[in-house]
Structures are given as structure tokens and as C-alpha cells.
Image (cartoon, coloured by chain):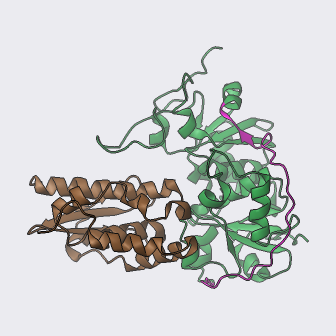
């Protein structure tokens, strides 16, 4: 059974306020039937140092990625993951994590690929919970195994592949990496391994909006007026736009995907999870260097 | 004389300790190592310029290697919110401290991090961070030997 949304007025201005919960709300609802709290971090050991009481851990590398192919896990593995974490198909999931919820947003996005309906983010993530002096425990949660159904992964609506991006060129693209990664400037010294991509720069016409511009100092999401200033006025996005966001491996752009789709209400937003580690190594795809978006090559 | 081609006992012990455990307990052991990373000696804490950033790690981790009278010392610092990175640094600091420069360069294989049985528990990508740290330690040892 889903749990009623957080009625906090500060979320009401967002397009889908039911996608966020505050730390106060979470503290009040911990242990409520139908609610499962998931921690998802960049650091695989952070959960073990102390987590929200009752929270289960989902790791993006170990749990969400296929161990062999560069892809997410399939339907059976997902059903097993969810069952083992005590999550039912109609559970309300609240995800939180480190780094202003990068990985939490990534987990939420992957859960959404499998059509899990009620999955929300803890606004401000782990850092806010901790800063407020709320309880963290190293006690293992008592998990009652569930029987999560095997459901197809539906990639089309929120995931973009390289071919989709090539076909999309000319329509709004948001590169959420740092300005240095966007321009192709390299700061690595000689003899240091250059990881992830063979070429530097960005996809032609992409606007550079580093993901963190959507987050306030404390990691909570910025108010809608500030998000509008960044993405509508700054990056030129307009209602009805079909948007693709990317970064290096799709984690930071999941954060932006969440902002554009759930908070600002853009219907059609896809995350290109292949991102720069694919594009920057692919053969004969167009690349622009420098601080300007650049032109889309004629087809 | 120490044989400069045999994996030093300190590192062999750490490896065996990990391999004797199941996947979940390996994570716990890594967490213990993380808690054991010593604070930076004051002489480095006051001189962040001496520390080298390990770019292969997503979390900010800095290290510094010294060679004093033929003995290697490894110092590292990483934030509390990055326990995995701290664990990697701690393993290297504990395993490499007290070795001779020749041992570090010749007896410690570059793929030592891959032999700890952690790849499956933390993922190959994360282990690359530790490989990067080891490579930087070795490079710094070479630089110290060359008088830098």
C-alpha cells in the first residue's frame, strides 16, 4: 500500500510534489507499513558506517549494473533485488544518498525503468539528515522478503541510447558536467591515466548546465523560480521540449533528469546513460570543443 | 637482506585476511581498515601543497610518500564520508610502510589491489581507484630515489 505524500508547502510549487519527502516527514513515517527506505551512495561502504534506521542498501555498481554487459540488470535480477530488500510492487520507496542525492536519483531512475510507481527522493539526502542530528544506526534492518514480480524494463520513455542522441541532434541537449569537462580542457598531467573516454569535449549544441546548479548549498533542491532561471532562461528550455541529459556515466544526469521531469514537469526527458564515456570513445560521432555549444553538423 | 621480488609479508597478510572471508565480511574488513587510517602527521597537515591528489578516485584523497634512511612511509588523507577510499589508502599505508623503496617498486605487483577479492564486493571501477593510488605511490618513490 502506498503511503500518503509529504504535504510540505515548500514542495507544492513543483510539478510533482509527491516525488519529494522532507527529513521531518521521513522521521515521522519510519517503520510505517508500505514504506521502504533505500540508501544509495557513491561510496559502497558509507551505508555500513551508519544509515537511517530500517533503511536497506542498494549499490549502483554491485546491484543495479549488469556484471558483464554495460547495461542495467534485467527483469529477473531486478525482481530478486527488490524482493531481497523487502520491496513490493506497490511499496512506497524513499531513496536518499550522499553527494546531494546523485546516486539516489540514479537508483530512482533505474527503478523507474522498471516502472516502479511510487519512488521518491529525500530532499537534501544523507547530508541533511545527518546535519540535523537525526538518528543513524549500524543495526541491520529486519527485512521481510517479498515476492516482487518479474517486470519488463521499459527503456524507451526515459532512457536514450547513442543512436537516439544522434537522431536527436538539433533538439535540446543538456550536458550536466563541469565546465572543464564540457570544454574539453584537460587538467590531467602527463603519465596519469586518462580514464573513461578517448576524446574530450561535448556533443554539438549541448547546453552546459552543471548538475549542482539545481541544488542549494545544503543539497536540497532549489525553489522552482531558481530552477526556471537556470533551465528555462539560462539553457533555453521551453514547455513541450523533448530533452536529453547526459554526463560522464549517467549518474549526475539522473539528478538533472529528476529535476526536469519531476520538479519542473517536462514530460519528455531522457537520460543518456552511455554519456561521455561512450560518446567520447565512439567512432565518427561529432564533437565540439570549447565553451560554446557549437553547430549541429549537416546530415 | 630482504628478497625484493617476493610479496612483502605485510601485504600478503592483508590479502590472505581478505580472501579468508566471504564477500560481505570483506566489506566489513575494508571498513575496519578505513577506521584505522592514521591522521596525517602535523608536518603534512600544515602543508597541503606537498600532498598529491589521486585523480583516479572520485572522492578527494591525497597522499604523500617519504623515504627516510631507506625506509618508505606512506601518508594519506581522505574524508570520513569516503570510507571506501579511506580503506584503500589505509591498506596501502599499512602494507607499504616500512618497506624498502626497492621492495615497493619490484615486489609489489601493480595489480595487487585486484588480488584482494574485493573486485566483486566493491566493483572493478572502484578498485581502479586503489590501483591509481598504488601507481602514484610508486611514482613518488621513484621520484624520491631520484632526489626529488
Residue occupying image coordinates x 69% and y 49%: A72
Instruction: Locate the C terminus of chain A by quadrant.
Output: top right
Q: Colour of chain A?
A: green
| Number of residue marks | 0
Q: Residue A58 at what x, y percent from top left?
A: 66, 65
Place residue A54 in its image quadrant.
bottom right
Bounds of the magenta span?
A: A135-162
Instruction: Locate the N terminus of chain A by quadrant.
Output: bottom right
Q: Residue A170 at what x, y percent from top left?
A: 67, 25
Q: Residue A210 at what x, y percent from top left?
A: 55, 47
Residue occupying image coordinates x 56% and y 33%: A279
Q: Main secondary structure of the magenta part?
A: loop
Tell me if I can see residue A145 in this picture.
yes
Q: Colour of chain B?
A: brown
> Toward the viewer: A200 or A148?
A148
Question: With respect to residue A238, does A204 lie above or below?
Answer: above
Amino acid at each position: 500500500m502506498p503511503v500518503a505524500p509529504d504535504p510540505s508547502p515548500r514542495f507544492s510549487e513543483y510539478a510533482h510534489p509527491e516525488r519529494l519527502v522532507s527529513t521531518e516527514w521521513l522521521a515521522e513515517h519510519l517503520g510505517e507499513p508500505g514504506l521502504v527506505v533505500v540508501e544509495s551512495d557513491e561510496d559502497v561502504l558509507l551505508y555500513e558506517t551508519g544509515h537511517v534506521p530500517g533503511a536497506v542498501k542498494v549499490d549502483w555498481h554491485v546491484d543495479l549494473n549488469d556484471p558483464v554487459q554495460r547495461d542495467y540488470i534485467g527483469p529477473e535480477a531486478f525482481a530478486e533485488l527488490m524482493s531481497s530488500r523487502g520491496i513490493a510492487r506497490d511499496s512506497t520507496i524513499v531513496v536518499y544518498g550522499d553527494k546531494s542525492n546523485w546516486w539516489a536519483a540514479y537508483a530512482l531512475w533505474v527503478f523507474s525503468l522498471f516502472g516502479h510507481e511510487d519512488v521518491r527522493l529525500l530532499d537534501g539526502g544523507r547530508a541533511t539528515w545527518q546535519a540535523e542530528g537525526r538518528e543513524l544506526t549500524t543495526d541491520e534492518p529486519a527485512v521481510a522478503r517479498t515476492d516482487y514480480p518479474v517486470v519488463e524494463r521499459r527503456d524507451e520513455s526515459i532512457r536514450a541510447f547513442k543512436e537516439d542522441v544522434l537522431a536527436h541532434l538539433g533538439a535540446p541537449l543538456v550536458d550536466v558536467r563541469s565546465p572543464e569537462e564540457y570544454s574539453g580542457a584537460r587538467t590531467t598531467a602527463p603519465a596519469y591515466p586518462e580514464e573513461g573516454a578517448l576524446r574530450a569535449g561535448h556533443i554539438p549544441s549541448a547546453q552546459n548546465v552543471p548538475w549542482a546548479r539545481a541544488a542549494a548549498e545544503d543539497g536540497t533542491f532549489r525553489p522552482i523560480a531558481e530552477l526556471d532561471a537556470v533551465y528555462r532562461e539560462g539553457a533555453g528550455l521551453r514547455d513541450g521540449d523533448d530533452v536529453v541529459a547526459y554526463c560522464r556515466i549517467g549518474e549526475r544526469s539522473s539528478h538533472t533528469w529528476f529535476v526536469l521531469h519531476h520538479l519542473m514537469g517536462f514530460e519528455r526527458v531522457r537520460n543518456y546513460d552511455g554519456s561521455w564515456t561512450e560518446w567520447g570513445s565512439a567512432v565518427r560521432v561529432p564533437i565540439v570543443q570549447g565553451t560554446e555549444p557549437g553547430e549541429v553538423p549537416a546530415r | 637482506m630482504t628478497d625484493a621480488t617476493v610479496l612483502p609479508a605485510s601485504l600478503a597478510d592483508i590479502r590472505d585476511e581478505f580472501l579468508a572471508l566471504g564477500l560481505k565480511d570483506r566489506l566489513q574488513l575494508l571498513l575496519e581498515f578505513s577506521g584505522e587510517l592514521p591522521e596525517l602527521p602535523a608536518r603534512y597537515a600544515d602543508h597541503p601543497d606537498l600532498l598529491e591528489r589521486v585523480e583516479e578516485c572520485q572522492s578527494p584523497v591525497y597522499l604523500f610518500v617519504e623515504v627516510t634512511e631507506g625506509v618508505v612511509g606512506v601518508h594519506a588523507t581522505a574524508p570520513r564520508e569516503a570510507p571506501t577510499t579511506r580503506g584503500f589508502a589505509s591498506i596501502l599505508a599499512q602494507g607499504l610502510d616500512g618497506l624498502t623503496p626497492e621492495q615497493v617498486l619490484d615486489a609489489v605487483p601493480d595489480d595487487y589491489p585486484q588480488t584482494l577479492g574485493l573486485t566483486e564486493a566493491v566493483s572493478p571501477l572502484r578498485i581502479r581507484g586503489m590501483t591509481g593510488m598504488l601507481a602514484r605511490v610508486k611514482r613518488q618513490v621513484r621520484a624520491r630515489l631520484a632526489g626529488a
